[in-house]
Image: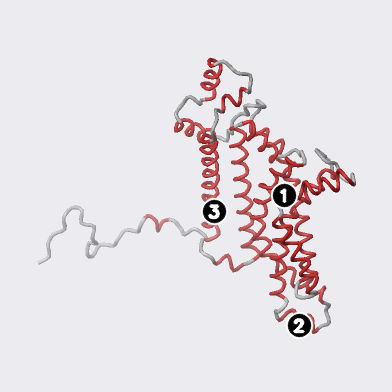
Amino acid sequence: MTSPKTAGDSGPTPGVARPPRLIAAFPPMPPMLRWLVRRTLLTFLVVLGAASVAFFALHLVPGDPVRALLGANNPSPELVEQVRHELGYDRPIVVQYGMFLGDLFRGDLGRSYQLQQPVTELIGSQLGATVQLALASFVLALVAATLLAVATAGRRPWLRRVSSGFELVAASSPPFWTGVLLLTFLSFKVHAFPAFGGTGVEGLVLPAITLALSLVGVLAQVIRESMERSLSEPYVVSARARGTGETGIRVRHTLRHTLVPVITLSGWAVGALLSGAVVVETVFSRQGVGRLMATAIESRDLPVVTGVVVVSALVFSVINLAVDALYRVVDPRMKAVAA
């Protein structure tokens, strides 16, 4: 004898069709759109994490930011407490963090303590110079690395050893040391380029070379290795059989196959250029977000520091998202990878 169903029994009733599930009413999301949504959420988390780390790290730095803001004029205790209250530093750290996130979600990065300007305007006024420096450095590094790889891939062992030694020295040399050497010889001795603060093309050459040298070594090794793998492919043997020269094979047939690893490295290169810009812009007294960041850290201008960190994380994440999307276009096999 079958027992009657009780309340809360979720089992199917014989003879009654199961209603379609709610999720079945929504069509499955295309893989590319699902990948884009997931990467967008990750970008949001990266920016939020970078902003949170910058906020708490700056509040853990020893010293009183209010006294650093007022300077060494021995301000009165009443003035210190008044400024502390106006800036919200007399509130619990959790409340300050909540206010910081609220302003961040509204797109408000705050106001500079030292310059008394909105942080978004300050960063916007300096961003163009940093982007110009980063693009010039990347193009210079890519051209130099490609020339080295084409000249040494699979031939001329002595030239390859010389090139490998140069790449090792360039990749391991800190940018500030390279910048000082270039200033010493090309500015102070030869007087070929301005030493500090040049705004034209002449002022861009030495900072761009300084940043590019740190990338040339890595890019040249990746391009050379990819090119050497391509040199053993059947289409290269066919090209040689048709009488194509070695340089022609490298330029017209194997060089395009190095595009995928170069695109993959582009995201990392952008991050390296942004972090290197802080040092290079300071060494050459060049305008830019890096120098703005260094000045803000020195004066403990917390809104500017957190603002630069947020913008840098956003730019880095967006460029990596674009690089990954381009990677899927260049290599169609990546479209089959689950999002």
Q: Is residue 330 above or below residue 156?
A: above
Q: Nearer the viewer, mark 2 or mark 1?
A: 1
Question: For the residue carrying disc 1, how many other residues have a C-alpha within 10 Å: few (<14), some (14-19), or many (20+)?
Answer: many
Q: Which mark is residue 238?
A: 2
Where is residue 195, by image quadrant? top right
Residue 59 image position (x, y, % from top left): 52, 34
x 66%, y 38%: residue: 293
Query: Is the Cβ of the residue at disc 1 closer than 8 Å to that at disc 3?
Result: no
Q: Is residue 126 above or below residue 324?
A: above
Q: Secondary structure at mark 2?
A: helix
Q: CA distance from mark 3 to mark 2?
A: 41 Å
Foreground pick, 271 / 58: 58
Q: Residue furthest bottom?
A: 241
x 78%, y 75%: residue: 155
Instruction: Judge from the rendering whether residue 35 lies leftward or rightward of residue 242; answer left or right.
Output: left
Q: Secondary structure at mark 3?
A: helix
Of labels 1 and 3, earlier in sequence is 3
Residue bearing mark 1: 175
Instruction: Judge from the rendering whether residue 36 lies leftward or rightward of residue 173; answer left or right.
Output: left
The mark total stands at: 3
Foreground pick, 16 / 62: 62
x 75%, y 55%: residue: 213
Residue 35 image position (x, y, % from top left): 53, 57
* Amino acid at the residue labelled 2: Ser
Q: Secondary structure at mark 1?
A: helix
Q: CA distance from mark 2 to mark 1?
A: 44 Å
Q: Nearer the viewer, mark 1 or mark 3?
A: 1
Residue bearing mark 3: 39
* Amino acid at the residue labelled 3: Arg
Foreground pick, 257 / 10: 257
* Amino acid at the residue labelled 1: Pro
Of labels 3 and 2, earlier in sequence is 3
